[in-house]
Image (cartoon, grey):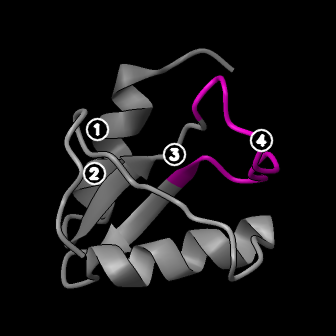
Amino acid sequence: MPFCREAAQRIRFKYSDRISVICEKADRSDTPDIDKKKYLVPADLTVGQFVYVIRKRIKLSPEKAIFIFINNVLPPT
């Protein structure tokens, strides 16, 4: 489905207290694909809490590492 700017603005207006997040996997990654790529997360959700949500969705074992980058920057958890 192509990106629709009007739909995105409508969603941002409806959920103004949330932050839109798009998750993408690195090309060289061997982790499983995620079933959901777009999220509307509460503004008070920490990076650590979001990582927990992602780990559960891709069923990643505790011994495997996951790194979240925001605009090519690794934020503190």
Q: Secondary structure at mark 3?
A: loop
Pointers 4 and 3 in contact (C-beta within 8 Å): no
Tag of residue 12: 2
- Distance Cα–Cα, label 1 vs label 4: 34 Å
Most extreme residue toward the front is: 63
Q: Give x and y (percent) for residue 35.
A: 79, 53
Magenta extent: 26-38
Q: Secondary structure at mark 4?
A: loop
Q: Give x and y (percent) for residue 22.
A: 46, 43
N-terminal of the two: label 4 or label 2?
2
Give the number of the mark in front: 1 or 3. 3
The residue beneath circle 4 is 30
In the figure, 48 relative to 25: above or below?
below
Pointers 2 and 1 in contact (C-beta within 8 Å): yes
36 in magenta: yes
Where on the picture, by quarter, is residue 17? Answer: bottom left
Does the magenta stretch mainly form a helix, a strand or a loop?
Answer: loop
Amino acid type for the residue under numbered disc 1: Gln
In the figure, 11 relative to 43: above or below?
above
- Distance Cα–Cα, label 4 vs label 3: 15 Å
Amino acid type for the residue under numbered disc 3: Cys
Pointers 3 and 2 in contact (C-beta within 8 Å): no
Residue 60 as seen in the image, left or right of residue 10: right
Pointers 1 and 3 in contact (C-beta within 8 Å): no
Residue 28 as seen in the image, left or right of residue 65: right
Q: Secondary structure at mark 2?
A: helix
